[in-house]
Image (spheres, grey):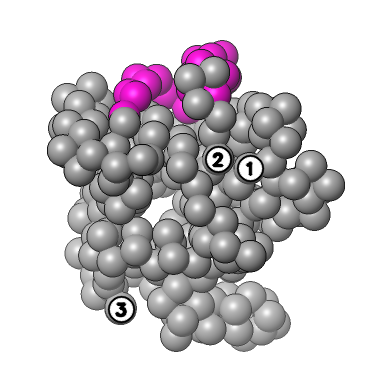
Amino acid sequence: MNFLPKSIFITGASSGIGKALALEYAEEGITLFLCGRNKERLNEVVAACHRKGACVYPYLFDVRDADSTLIAIQAANTICPIDLLIANAGVSAGVLGTDETPVSTRTIFETNIFGVVNTVLPAIEVMKHNGSGQIAIISSLSGFRGMASCPAYSASKSCVKAWGEALWGFVRPYHIHVSVICPGFIETPLTDKNRFRMPFLMKAPEAARIIRRKLKRCPPIIAFPWIMALGARLGAILPARFILPILGQLPKKEK
């Protein structure tokens, strides 16, 4: 199949992959619902997408707020039925300016897990009503195995990866397609804080082009770059006693 969405709802659209995806999809005939917490940055992305010919509606809210997220999705779907929702908003300890402390761990879980839940559940309901739709959940290659360098972050990405994979079959009877996106290192605010070598580091616009191209086929999993994806899959199946000591040597994300 070749799924070509005309209306796209993106959370975390004010920076990083969300911003890159907004700009990638922005063109004449496309309606974008762009969401973020930073009004100034979000307005800049909205203006850039307008210049590319898209019809753009901004929504300012925090995905941790379930009521605000629900209201935004329902309001957007009233303007134009949502074809594709991209649950992208997420944080890491580096972005929060700290190590993975008890406080930042809870913030990561609240944003990366419950923020996705708050976004995806209302999307399923409106897409059931619409009769079809596509949901993309941004996970990470770090979600294939718990990483000692970022325990809370990798755990949160593992959770939404597993949930998205399970949803793939759960919502298919409603003609809703779910894809879980697992990128490697992308140049975003989440990786800008890292001071260690990031193999196969990719620019956000390039990642957005890959995601858009692959989402057309509605695959259950989109993992890239392929060589890192292969390593992540191998790491996931190796016995813990072999792989965990190796992962334990990886450098931590810095403040």
Q: Which of 208 and 238 is in front in this view?
A: 208
Q: How far apart are marks 3 and 1 (CA)?
A: 35 Å
Query: How many other residues sit within 10 Å of disc 3, few (<14), some (14-19) or many (≥20)?
Result: few
Residue at (80%, 54%) from the top-left corner?
169
User: Where 120 sits versus 88, above or below?
Assistant: above
Contact, mark 3 vs mark 2 (Cβ under 8 Å): no
Q: What residue type is labelled 2?
A: Asp
Q: Report helix, strand or loop for mark 3.
A: loop
Task: Give the alpha-carbon distance from disc 3 to disc 2, as whole Å.
Answer: 34 Å
Q: Give the range drawn in magenta.
A: 56-77
Please tell me which of labels 3 and 1 falls first in the chain. Answer: 1
**Percent coordinates x, y for residue 29 in the rendering:** 36, 40
Q: What residue type is labelled 1?
A: Gly
Mark 2 = which residue? 83
Near mark 1 (Cα within 10 A), the count class, few <14, some 14-19 or many ≥20, is: many
Dot 2, how many residues are within 10 Å of its Cα: few (below 14), some (14-19), or many (20+)? many
Q: Name the N-terminal-most of marks 1 and 2.
A: 2
Q: Residue 133 carries which label?
A: 1
Q: Are marks 1 and 2 in contact (CB under 8 Å)?
A: yes
Q: Which of marks 3 and 2 is nearer the N terminus?
A: 2
Quadrant location of the N terminus? Answer: bottom right
Secondary structure state at the residue bearing disc 2: loop
Relative vertical location of residue 156 with respect to residue 45 in this rendering, above or below? below
Q: How far is mark 1 from mark 2, CA to CA?
A: 5 Å
- 106 or 136, which lies in front? 136
Q: Would residue 41 be visible to someone looking at this image?
A: no
Q: Does the magenta stretch include residue 62?
A: yes
Percent position of residue 121, x then y: 67, 31
Q: Mark 3 points at which residue?
A: 199
Give left or right: position of 211 versus 146: left
Residue 81 shown left or right of residue 34 in the figure: right
